[in-house]
Amino acid sequence: MKSTITVIVDEAKLGAAALFSSYLVWLLTFILCVLWVLQLYWLNSGLKKFPSIFIVSIEAIVNEFVAVLGGMLYFQEYQYMDSTKTVLFIAGFLFGALGISLFASKEIKYDSSSKTKIDAESSSYMYPNESSVDQSEPLLIDEGK
């Protein structure tokens, strides 16, 4: 994303004609849009099959990795890193991924009578998938009237 915006800004400095006539701007914009659509497709497919806490956590780790690695390669920031900075960078990334993974792995209890999941910490109800929700009746919202 950052590299695409940088290319667009650099082309825009040359004028509108240069911006809209640059094949690189069109190519990067097209690739970015395709990847966004694929990301939404993957996210929705995962949310249909698995609890949202796992899917959102995995997406956070993947987004962090792709953004950092993409920026590092595009802007060649790795050339300015000595061995100490490299080790600290890898350790920091792994520490962040571990934190997200630990957050996603919290214990979830099931209520067997209603086939819903109960969050162990907040006691809020969450449905594991669409099939456990009775969609035959309309949702009624009590507005206090």
Image (spheres, rainbow, N blue to C red):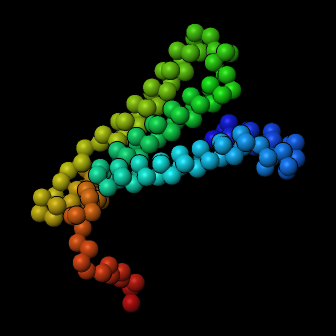
Task: Name the spot of residue 102 as percent of width and height, x first.
Answer: 35, 36
* Tally of marks: 0
| Front residue of this view, candidates 9 and 26 | 26
Query: Quadrant of residue 137 in the image?
Result: bottom left
Residue at 16% over, 64% down = 114
| Front residue of this view, candidates 128 and 109 | 128
User: On the rendered image, what quadrant is the C terminus found in?
Assistant: bottom left
Res 121 seen here: no
Residue at 43% over, 52% down = 41
| Front residue of this view, candidates 97 and 13 | 13
Which residue sits furthest top?
83
Task: Name the spot of residue 61 as percent of width and height, x first.
Answer: 45, 36
User: On the rendered image, what quadrant is the N terminus found in?
Assistant: top right
Query: Quadrant of residue 142 in the image?
Result: bottom left
Residue at 34% over, 44% down = 54
| Front residue of this view, candidates 23 and 79 | 23
